[in-house]
Image: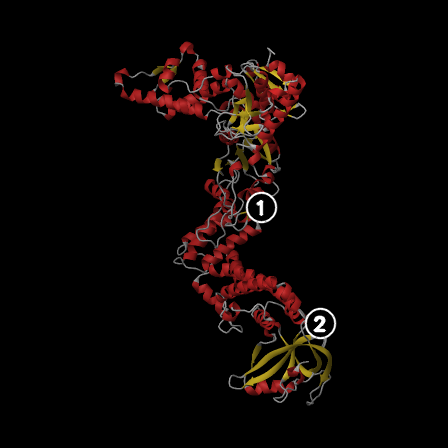
Amino acid sequence: MNRKERSIPTELPVICLDASLMVFPGLYTRLYGQDPKTILDFMNNFGITTELPWVITVMSNPKEENFPDKFYRTGVVSKIEVDTENGSMIIRGLYRAQILDFKSVYLDVEGGGDNPSHYLATIKYLHDENCDEYFVNSEVAIRGSLFVIRKVFLQYLKEIREVCDITNLAINVSNIKKLDYKDKDAIDELVWAILYHMPSEVMSQERQVFLESDNLIERVELLGKLVDKHLRIALFANEHFRSLSEKSRTKLLRGDIDQPQNNKADESVEKDDQGGFDAKTEPELFERWERYKKIRDTLDPEAQEAILEDFARIRGNHSGQSEFELFLNHLDCLLDIYSAVTTPQEKDISKVEKILDESHFGLEDVKSEIYNHLAVKTLNPTGKAPILCFVGPPGVGKTSIGKSIAEALGLKFTRKSLGGVRDEADIRGHRQTYIGAIPGQIIQEIRRMGVKNPVFMLDEIDKLNNDFRGDPSSALLEVLDPEQNHSFQDHYVGAPYDLSGVLFLCTANTESSIQPALHDRMNVVHVSGYTELEKVQIAKKFLIPKQLAEVGLSSKGVKLCWPDNNPDPIISKIISGYTREAGVRELERQIHKALSIWARQYLKEDDDKKSTEILITEELVEKLLGAPKWTHERANVTEIGEAIGLAWTPVGGDILYIQAALLPFTGKMLSLTGSQGKVMIEACKVAMSRLRIYLERAGKTSLIKNKTVHIHIPQGAVPKDGPSAGITTFCALYSEAFGLKVKPLITMTGELTLKGMVTRVGGIKEKILAAHRDGIREVILPASNKRDVDKDIPEEIKKDLKFYFITHDEEALPIVFPEN
């Protein structure tokens, strides 16, 4: 006990205070009475005199009912002062103390009684554990903790000033900012001062923990958690407070309204069948209430509550206030989406197949997957089948497939492109507290179409991005996951919405770019490129009639005529000479270009000379489109040290020339150029090792001794990567080392191992279509890819190509170098 403590008696009266009036060391609490006499009577009842103004203040334990057990045993030794002018009693907290024992005191009043009127307590003063060592060793940590507490508390004060009248602070804000982090007494005072300003909702148990703690560092850590918790509560409360009108705010600050009254207002709106809205004076609200009554029985409780809350808010605001329009817009959104209807769906799967077959030529495997999926949805509409995702190069008709599915099912169709979307709010919407808040794109489209079960196409799902605004691909999980989308939560709507009736379809160019968790919810359907025969049929049946209408010639009765009434050779010339793609987008552009030029000439002719028939010949095609852009003579000529490989790209397959050369030593054994990726570089190194093995067998290692082996892939500006160039690189190196030409019009693909095995690769259909398109006649493939050829390659392609299936690079040599 220090010198000051020795002047205070160790037996003191006990005063029990409510948690909201709790006294803390270094702070004071003012208790107001009706007059000074009332205060003096209070002091006399507890045996407190001006000569002995000391008490110990404690809080009551809500878990106990009987005294003295109801008193917490740790409290604050305090001094009582009387302010007779203001009619108040000031209790100044000084030291923490522990009650060792109680002594009951009875008043000698008429009638007596067995219950004690107050208690005297024997006390022991408490002191903090020595934490000097912690301050020395962890000064940065304690400084960081106090800096965060200070910052959060100041923000907390700023927030509660909006909803509370804080004029007298028991703490000097400027002192908080100038806190000496090495002064333990100053830190202790800061802890108690901040705790004092925590709301009365901080129960006595929480405050008692601070009083019983004998470690300053522990109190700092507890305070950090408490302040952060109540800042989040204050922020949440202010969101609601700021959404109120000025009148409502004033009432709330005066305490004229509270939450139970708001609930009663909602109940009164619900009980009144007219909603309390007059059809003459409030026609807009009356009409909205009538809409609500029509759908009321179909709504979930949460949706009903959200709508009723909007009605209650609108009732508390007049039409001139900005909040009125915000609440009205939100109410309209809720009524629109919850009153959306369900469109009857075509259940005859044979009709669906007929419509899809008429609108799309080929794609048999893709259409088979679609039919299977729709059959399951027809038999079990509430089932949780995975989402269809069409993956393939541009221009193959992924989006148009979705339109045809909607047409076949008799449903409305909508699409949204997700390319470049990086804000989570585009999917989930903005919270109402934001200025200009709107629903997410999913809810916007549901509202616009007015139906619950459209066909919704999400294009370019592999091009989603994310940044500080959130991860939209993660937000899409709730949209596309059948286990979750029956209760989708849009931030703007604020109530769950059932998306299980929506038929979602997705498209992507590359499967690997789709977020893994999103990919797991999808049934991926690969849409490969078209063969030349399929392109010819698509052009005849769809593209040419469409473009005749687009340029306006069909409206003038203009028709196309073909030599021998056979358009196939002319269309094939356009395909092979002017396009180089997996899809038909460029083909459509070329047809549009040719017809546009003819349309200009048609307008220049005199009316009596205008012809309604156009004879399309090869000469006319070259006149309209110019000389062919692509020729295939290159594949027929290969130099020593050059081989032709096959590559898969996001826009389809392509042939790849790989060139090798032995040069005078330049300081390194292997030089690689042509924008080769990491995996392709490794494939080149494996091919180089395989060449060394063959040279060792032939006793010709001198051929590469003191030489630099240079491997180049033309079109150096185009990035290239993948392991499938292994066998091609090996053949190019072998050709250069042994001076042998690779057989013309032959191409190959396959990953090469260090032991010479040729292993399976992907993208076989795209690669073979590219080979066929570029005039290749023979293809070498890994034996494990034979089933891909049997399954995916059309017969008209197979009959034009000769396939070799190998398992080892030794098998490739006699095929590639027949003259060896």
Left or right: where 127 falls relative to 275? right
Do we see residue 409 in this rendering? yes
**Residue 340's x, y, as percent?**
50, 42
Tell which residue pokes out farthest to the top in this image.
564
Residue 222 in view: no
Q: Quadrant of residue 128?
A: bottom right
Quarter of the image with the C terminus is: top right
Marks 2 and 1, Cα distance to the nearest angstrom?
45 Å
Residue 277's place in the image compared with 200, above or below, is above
Reading the image, the residue beneath label 1 is 487
Residue ID for mark 2: 64
Which x, y percent locates residue 756?
66, 23
> Relative to the observer, which residue lies in front, 600 or 331?
600
Q: Position of residue 769 (x, y in %)?
A: 53, 20
Label placed on residue 257: none
Identify the residue shown where x is 65% and y is 20%.
694
Quadrant of the frame with the N terminus: bottom right
The colour scheme is secondary structure
